[in-house]
Amino acid sequence: MTAPDSTTTIRVGGDEGYDVVIGDGVLAGLGDALGPAVKKVLVVHPSTLGARAAALRESLQDRFEVLLAEIPDAEAGKRIEVAAFCWQVLGQADFTRTDAVVGIGGGAVTDLAGFVAATWLRGVRVVQVPTTVLGMVDAAVGGKTGINTNEGKNLVGAFHPPAAVLCDLDLLDTLPRNEILAGFAEIVKAGFIRYPEILDIIEADPDAATDPASPQFRRVVELAIRMKADVVSEDLTEQGLREILNYGHTLGHAVEHAERYQWRHGAAISVGMAFAAELGRLSGRLSDEVADRHRSILELLGLPTTYPAGRWPTLLATMQRDKKSRAGQLRFIVLDDLAKPTVMLAPDQSLLFAAYQEIAS
Ligand SMILES: NC(=O)c1ccc[n+]([C@@H]2O[C@H](COP(=O)([O-])OP(=O)(O)OC[C@H]3O[C@@H](n4cnc5c(N)ncnc54)[C@H](O)[C@@H]3O)[C@@H](O)[C@H]2O)c1
Ligand SMILES: O=C(O)C(=O)C[C@@H](O)[C@H](O)[C@H](O)COP(=O)(O)O
Ligand SMILES: [Zn+2]
């Protein structure tokens, strides 16, 4: 496999179509992505990317008035108080509807920055600059924005597609290895629900696949983004098809909540996919081979696939608030086979418990 030294552009369709641009150095295109009408720009970033954000301001300030908003790291940034802080900055700077927000950071930052952009004056332009693998392949693409509440994950939010997504692979140079691996949980998800080629590439050589300099990495990242772009182009507001992107998330979000958001999202989703595989197997939909492949590939990547047995009642209670629930009935995404996701409606409590027993530690 030869590494593409060029830039790839994946178009997301729909009423407000936009490009996801992937490659080395693509951040240089940020000024053009913001567009000619924009006068003021708020760059939202975590402290870990303070130097990057300052450099960005330097590079943009001959064309725009640039403000920086440093927010708390990771999930601590996805809170209403942090959104209120950003609204205050925007208000004090007289941001108008022709101004724009830039989110530079991992998925937590792009979710918060997108939410601020969605709500300020009922919606201003946002350009997303994901700096984690997870942000590039999933969070920054698709226009789902939001924050957490005490009761659960992403319970408040809006669909607000970005004007562009710039996936500058150079930004991954400083990303710790455990964050790269956490991002692979969403790449594996894309492999199970749409592109099994992803699974083959990872299994053939996990070290190469997870090395941002390798052609294998570029291939799996692009396949995952293509999958997400195709799905959200067809169903932005999750009326149907988009629910497949929630594979592993029903239990995964409950694990994040139980862990008070101290676990990586990818790690929680890994446990959630192991659980979804068992649901598929025990309900007679999924072969042992495909179900077992979940655990083996996730463990190959050093991701967790088990969770303490005694936590089941708490997890079950939290899952009731899952956004896919309808009239108090739980709904899970499960597989009939590789690349054949479907909805399982109101599964019996005994089936859920039995599936949990299979992943309980
Ligand atoms: N909106 C969506 O469609 C969507 C999809 C998937 C996940 N998400 C959300 O994304 C979040 C998880 O995103 P994440 O895994 O990127 O976590 P994150 O945003 O918490 O970032 C992980 C850590 O990496 C650090 N970091 C980021 N970029 C770095 C870089 N280039 N170099 C060094 N350190 C860097 C951050 O400071 C943070 O400590 C969750 O809140 C999840 O709910 C949203
Ligand atoms: O984009 C989507 O749709 C997804 O479900 C992608 C998920 O990976 C992501 O974690 C998303 O934030 C979950 O959304 P939620 O609506 O279940 O909170
Ligand atoms: Zn996710």
Image: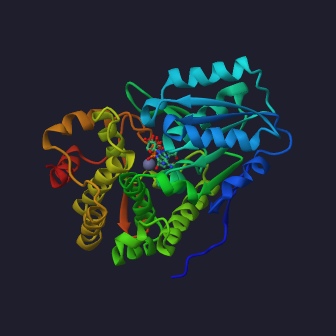
Q: Residue at x 24, y 55 (%)?
A: 305
Residue 273 place in picture, x, y as percent: 32, 55
Give the mark count.
0
- In this view of the protein, can residue 158 be seen by the observer? no
Vertical position of residue 270 compared to residue 204: above or below: above
Residue 327 place in picture, x, y as percent: 41, 35
Vertical position of residue 266 compared to residue 253: above or below: below
Q: Name the side, left or right, on which 99 lies relative to 234.
A: right
Vertical position of residue 190 compared to residue 215: above or below: above
Q: Name the side, left or right, on which 354 lies relative to 192.
A: left
Q: Nearer the viewer, residue 349 or 58?
A: 58
Vertical position of residue 213 compared to residue 244: above or below: below
Q: Residue at x 24, y 68 (%)?
A: 292
Q: Nearer the viewer, residue 148 or 165?
A: 165
Q: Residue at x 59, y 33 (%)?
A: 115
Q: Nearer the viewer, residue 269 or 39?
A: 39
Residue 257 quadrant: top left
- In this view of the protein, can residue 228 be seen by the observer? yes
Q: Residue at x 23, y 70 (%)?
A: 288
Residue 342 place in picture, x, y as percent: 42, 59
In the rendered image, the residue lying farthest to the right is 36
Residue 236 place in picture, x, y as percent: 61, 49
Indicate the colouring scheme: rainbow
In the rendered image, the residue lying farthest to the bottom is 1
